[in-house]
Amino acid sequence: MTTPPISRYPVPDLADLPEDLRARVLAVQEKAGFVPNVFLALAHRPDECRAFFAYHDALMLRPSGLSKGEKEMIVVATSGANGCLYCVVAHGAILRIMEKNPLIADQVAVNHRKADLTPRQKAMLDFALQVCRDSAAIGEDDHAALHAHGFTDEDIWDIGGITAFFGLSNRMANLIGMRPNDEFFLMGRQPRPARP
């Protein structure tokens, strides 16, 4: 069986990428042990690729009242709602690793209300899914519910910003038929073997 392409659009060779993008991809490869397909698929349009990852980093790497694991929960829950296989699989792997929990990503992707989460995290995902599905209906009561769980206004911006950004990501991944790397499916599901 032949492996399907990672995108319906042309995927540049690593050697043909602009130097800044190639350096970023090589750094990710060094850390992960493989190149996530999103880097090569989006590099079809280098300027948009740079903008995408700049915004990604601004949201996902900034100091926040949300943990890195909680940010990944938002990505997985809203990507599940948007039917984005790539983001559910790739960010599900990151979520499992961040939370050291092999079950959490599947629970969050399918139904966060049945997941092994805190009431605070469930409220966070309720809000994220509201932003995802019907942002026009958000009102003061929605903000008040998050404040009651200890979220600040800046945290609420983070929840909404991550949801909105990954709405773009989900739609582009679906548009171009972006295939998740096989490596992502198994990451964080089994304990790592002890090092000798």
Image (cartoon, rainbow, N blue to C red):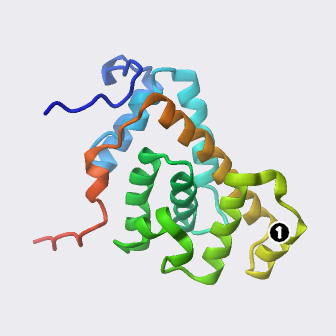
Compare residues 185 and 70 and report the one nearer the observer: 185
Compare residues 63 and 127 and report the one nearer the observer: 127
Quadrant (top left/top right/bottom left/bottom right) for the N terminus: top left
Residue in view at x 59 percent, y 46 percent: 166
Residue in view at x 48 percent, y 80 percent: 116
Q: Name the residue under label 1.
A: 143
As displayed, is residue 28 above or below residue 3? below
Identity, as a three-letter code, of the amino acid under mark 1: His
Residue in view at x 37 percent, y 43 percent: 28
As displayed, is residue 78 above or below residue 4? below
Quadrant (top left/top right/bottom left/bottom right) for the C terminus: bottom left
Left or right of 77, for residue 35? left
Q: Which element type, helix, strand or loop, lies under badge 1?
A: helix
Image quadrant where residue 127 sits: bottom right
Image quadrant where residue 36 sits: top left
Q: Where is residue 128 in the image (x, y as percent from the top left)?
A: 67, 61
Q: Is residue 134 visible?
A: yes
